Image: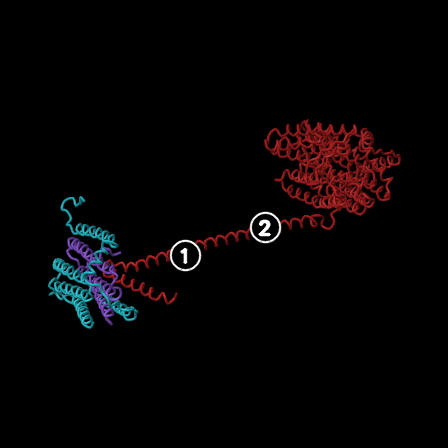
Chain colours: A purple, B red, C cyan
Amino acid sequence: MIYELQIALAIGAALFGVGLYGALSQTNLVMIIMGVELILAAALVNLVAFWRYLHPEVIPAQMFVLIIMAVMAVEMAVGFGIAIARFRSRGSVEMEEARELKG
Amino acid sequence: MSLILLVLLAPLAGAVLILSLRKFSEVTALAAIGISFAAAYGLLIAGFGGATSQLVLPGLPEMPLRLLATPLTALFSALVATVATFVLLYAVGYMRTDPEKPRFFATMLLFVTAMQALVLSGDWITMLAGWELIGFSSYLLIGFWYRRTGVASAATRAFIYTRSADLGLYIGIFVLIGASGTTEISATLTTTGPAAVIAGLLLLIAAIGKSAQVPLQDWLQRAMAGPTPVSALLHSATLVAAGAILLIRVAPMLPNEALLATGLVGGVTAVVAGLTALGERDLKRMLAASTSSQYGLMLVAIGAGVPIAALLHLIAHAAIKSSLFLGAGVFQHDRESTDFDALAGSGRARPKIFAAFTISALALAGIPPLAGFFSKDAIIAATLEAPGVIWLLPLALAGTVLTGAYMARALGLLWRGNAGSPAGNVVWMGTGIGVLVALVVVLGAGFAPLEKLLEAELGASILAMALGLGAALIGLTLGWFVPMPRLLGPVRPWAQRGFVVAGGFDALLLRPAMMIAQGCEALERRLYNGVLKFGRLNLVLGVFTRKSDERGIDAAIFAFVARTVAAGRKVRLLQSGFIHKQMGLTIIGTGVIIALLLVAPLFS
Amino acid sequence: MTIQVFFLAFFGGAAVWFGVVVFRTHSMVRSALALLFSQTAIGGMFLVMQAEFLGVLQIMMMATEMSVMAIFMVMFMMDPGGMGAMDMTHQKRLSLWAGAVGFAVALAAVVLGQWGPVALEVPSAEAQIEMLGIELMERSMFIFQSAGLTILTAMVAATMVALAPLKHGGKDDL
């Protein structure tokens, strides 16, 4: 209890860092999505830690977590739909080859 | 009032018509001058009835233009109209074969208009305008045959000499207007004191110029380069009369000093010009010198204090001299020259014209009952009564003697010699001469009514009549019998050169005037070049502006555009199309915003 | 308390370690599985922090999702097995820096922040569920309804995007 909050928040910070590294450094679209998943998970960890250690009687915090989880799922679904479409048209989902929006 | 307008506008309209149509010039001229003649005599008859009419036209503020028809001015007007009519009649025949007739008649009509304006003027401005215009028309008419050698320079000389004396008129008028505060002539004649003396002397200078008195008598002889009708009209009866007319009109104002000066100038001129006339070898030049001499006698009369005598002599002289000139013109027509050697015997070839010539010559000398006798008599009587009788009487008598002498000489030269082949008929010219000579004969009878009209009766003086007649007869005899070199004696070389003193007016007036003119032309040329240089400078400025606009402003703008496009090209690199790069930029941007948000509270 | 701290630290460390493994391994399947374990560890953390509903939900959902993701990875990846030993990363320096800076800043905020007194009393699981249900029916009804609509739209959109283009005409009749 003494440092639990800080530990949890630190875990969340580390997850965020790793997720950020992954989202920026990967060439494949799916890997990028995985990085974004990690970032969102870090946010969830922070939220739950705040709920548990600062305001456990405020249930809307859990509501927030639920919503984020739902949105994560939807985001993945849409992301994979796009990946399929891209794979169909170009034959790969490598982001190194996706230069069509070059201006 | 409308008669005055008619007198002036008829010749003016005629001139305009001739200049615009260039045809029917003789008919138009005669019609115009006829109307003017009738109107002038209408004024004179009205004047006999004692009527005075006035025409006031708007002029400068407080200086309206007045045209006045008193008995005096109406008389002058009638005189001008008469001489003009018959000279123009004569000119129809004289200029018959000349191709530039329209210009001649138009200019003559213009001159008549100006002269009528001068004699009928009621204020100084109108008189000044008329004075200038008659000088200008004289220049145009003397130089009528400008293509002949020497004519243009003679006209220029005449114009410059008379013009130089006009300065006296200008300053005199300014003195009078300043002294009396109005431009009306009759009002200014009440000036007295030093202003009157100065004005009188200045007006005398103007009269010297216009009437060819000493020392400005030379221009009249040069003026003989023009056609003979011009000499008959301008240089015997009207233009040269302008000086005398001016002095007659201001005579009431002239104080004793001015009168004395006038008389002396007139007397000296009478003698000097008479000697010149005696020594002349050209008929027209002799008549010109004679005109100067006669006007000298008129000035003597004014100087003696009897302007009416001058007036009578003016009228008589007008008729006489114009008829003498017209006769000379007929002889010139025959022999194509006016030199006495060429004209020898031409009188014998045309007896009728010569008879008329003789009558006029005798009238001029002063033989009764011709007009000249009465006027000469009046002048000599006036000098007898004058304060300066010691000066004026001898000069007047000498003038009379010389008159007789040179006229008789002329008659002799014309008569003696070969008659040559018979000449053709001269209807127009003969008519003109005839009427004028008739006037010469009958005018003497008309002098008494004139004196009554002008309310200045002259008493008859037996002494004056005797002196005058005696002098005339002496002169005539000398002239006919004694050859000219013996008559003139030691004075002959001077007389033949026209009494030129110190290089004459050529050196005094003409050359300085021409030098000033040339200097003005050089100045103008320099100004013109300066303006051209300024224009070129502006052109250079314009080219410089254009170039700087192209190189400077356009280049700056295009460089700016180029740099913007280059910057855009560099920024384009950010738009790589790679998602990971975009995400990287997003993360960096978000980091910056968060940093700002964290730091902001420190500054609030 | 120390038990909870220990488990918290254990599950947290596992989550972080598996997260790192996701990006360090060459094999795609292993990557997906590592992510699965990471998410499960996070679910474990939730359970340790006495948010039972959320923890269970997390484990269940993430298990399903990661499986699906594994399938997709095999479908789309160039080298699913990871035997190719090709470097599949780019802009490594930037991402390393971004990750490190993000972690450092968050850590600084954690350490330097004044979080106040820590709560001791936590409602029981049943009470939490009951409160969640009431919350859902009262205040968050609108949120979930609109979220549901949005999710439906997203699903339809995703399906449409993933549909293969028609051979003839090429025009959809929707």
Q: Residue furthest right?
A: B462
* Secondary structure state at the residue bearing disc 2: helix
* Residue B291 position by quadrant: top right
Q: Is residue C77 visible?
A: no
Residue C18: quarter of image: bottom left
Q: Are marks 2 and 1 on the same chain?
A: yes
Q: Nearer the viewer, residue B553 or C143?
A: C143
**Residue at the image point whose x is 33% and y is 59% from the top:** B567
Query: Residue shown at 85%/36% (left/top)?
Result: B468
> Residue A64 appears at what percent x and percent y?
24, 59
The amino acid on which the numbered mark 1 sits, given as a three-letter code, is: Arg
Q: Chain of mark 1?
A: B
Numbered badge on residue C14 = none
Output the chain of dot 2: B
| Residue that mark 2 sits on | B524
The residue under label 2 is which amino acid type?
Answer: Glu
Secondary structure of the residue carrying tag 1 is helix
Write down the residue under mark 1: B551
Q: Is C9 located above or below residue B429 in the figure?
A: below
Who is closer to the viewer here, B400 or C36?
A: C36
- Packing grade of label 1 (10 A; few <14, some 14-19, many >=20) is few
Image location of residue B316, percent across then percent down: 78, 33
Residue B78 in picture, x, y percent from top left: 74, 31
Quarter in which the C terminus of chain B is drawn: bottom left
Which circle's residue, 2 or 1, is located before the other in the chain? Answer: 2
> What's the distance in space between the residues labelled 2 and 1, CA to CA?
40 Å
